[in-house]
Amino acid sequence: MIFSRRILCDLGIKITLSIPFWMQARLARAMQQHTEALSSKPQPWQIDPHHLIVIDPGHGGKDPGCIGHGNIYEKDIVLATALDLNMMLRRAGYRTLMTREKDIFVPLQNRVDFAERHHATLLVSVHANAIIGHPDIRGASVYTFSPDPSDPLAAEIAQSENSVEILSTPNFKGVSKETSKILFDLMSRRTKIESIAAQRSMVSSLSERVDMLTNPARKATFAVLQSDAIPSILVETAFLSNAKDEAALRTRAFRMRLSLSMKQAVDTWFLARQNSPENIES
C-alpha cells in the first residue's frame, strides 16, 4: 500500500510538472479561491478606479526567454507569476491589464505602446534571469531604465533581454518646440522619480519573502522600461541558471510569495503616491 501511494505521488508530481506553468496557475487558483484572503483584503485607502496597472509577463510564443535545466522556460514561469499578481491586484480593487495572458509573442515596442495607449499609471514587467557560466549567482532584483547600466551584470542581463535606445521625444500639440522640450523634460523627470520609488517599494517587499541578489536595486537599458510617460520597473524574480532558484521557481508556493510581494509593493507605492506625490526623493 505504501509502495503504491509512493508511485501515485511520484506520478502526480511528474504530471504536474508536465502541465504548462500558466495552466498550473489557473488550476491552482480554481482550487484555492477561498484560501488567499490576505491578497483580497480591502485597502486602507480608496483606490482610484482611473489608475491602471499594466502587468507585462516577459517573452512568450516563439521567444522562450531563459531556459533552465529540464527545459523550464522563462516565458511559462513569468506568465504563471503574472497571472497570480493580476488576480491579487484585481481582488484588491485595482484596475489591471496584461500585455499577454497566454503563450503568445508580443514585440517589446508593442508592450510599451500598449501601456502608453491605455494611459497606465504603472508598468510592472516580470522576468527571470540566467547567466551562463555563473551558476552561483541567485536572487531577485528590480530594475529601472537608465542609458548607463548600474554595473556589468546589469548590462549583461539587459543585453540578453534586448537592450535598445531611448524612445524619441513625444510631440505636445499646440505648443512650441521649446515648450515641448520643457514639458518632456518635466515628464521624464517625474516618471524617473516615480519609477525609483516603485523600485524601492518592490525591493523592500521582495526582501521580506525571497532571497535577493546583491545590490538588488539596479539600472539598465531594458527596452520595456523606456517610456518617459509611465513609471516602469522590471522584476527579475530569480535565476534559472542557479539550481536553488530554479527549483524554487518550479513551486507554486514560491511564485505566490513573489506575487504577493509584488502586490504589496504596489500598495505601498500607490499609498505614498496618493499621500505625498510631490515628496518622493530621487
Image (spheres, helix red, strand yellow):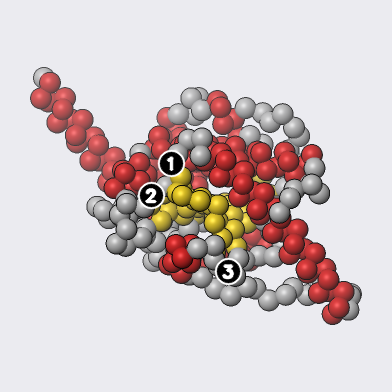
SS category of the residue bearing label 2: loop
| Labels 3 and 1: the sequence-earlier one | 3
Q: Which of marks 3 and 2 precedes in the sequence? A: 2
Disc 2, disc 1: CB below 8 Å? yes
Residue 265 quadrant: top right
Secondary structure of the residue carrying numbered label 3: loop
Between 41 and 176, the one nearer to me in the picture: 176
Q: Is residue 3 above or below residue 253?
A: above
As rendered, which of 179 and 38 lies closer to the eye? Answer: 179
Q: Which kind of residue does numbered mark 1 sit on?
A: Asp
Q: Is 29 left or right of 264, judged from the image as shown? A: left
Q: Residue at x 80, y 64 (%)?
A: 186
Which amino acid lies under the numbered mark 3 shown in the image of this protein?
Answer: Asp
Q: Which mark is residue 138?
A: 2
The residue that appears at 51% across and 35% down in the rendered structure is 208
CA separation, marks 3 and 1?
26 Å
User: Pointer 1: what residue?
Assistant: 211
The amino acid pointed to by label 2 is Arg
Give residue 50's position: percent from left, percent from top: 75, 47
Rendered-image quadrant of the N terminus: top left
Q: Secondary structure at mark 1?
A: loop
Location of residue 75 in the rendering, given as x and y in whole percent from the top left corner: 41, 56
Q: Residues within 10 Å of mark 3 (few under 14, many from 20)?
A: few
Instruction: Judge the density around disc 2: few (<14), some (14-19), many (≥20) Cα neighbours within 10 Å.
Output: many
Residue 208 can be seen in this image: yes
Which image quadrant for residue 203? top right
Q: Is residue 266 left or right of residue 80?
A: right
Residue at the disc numbered 3: 148
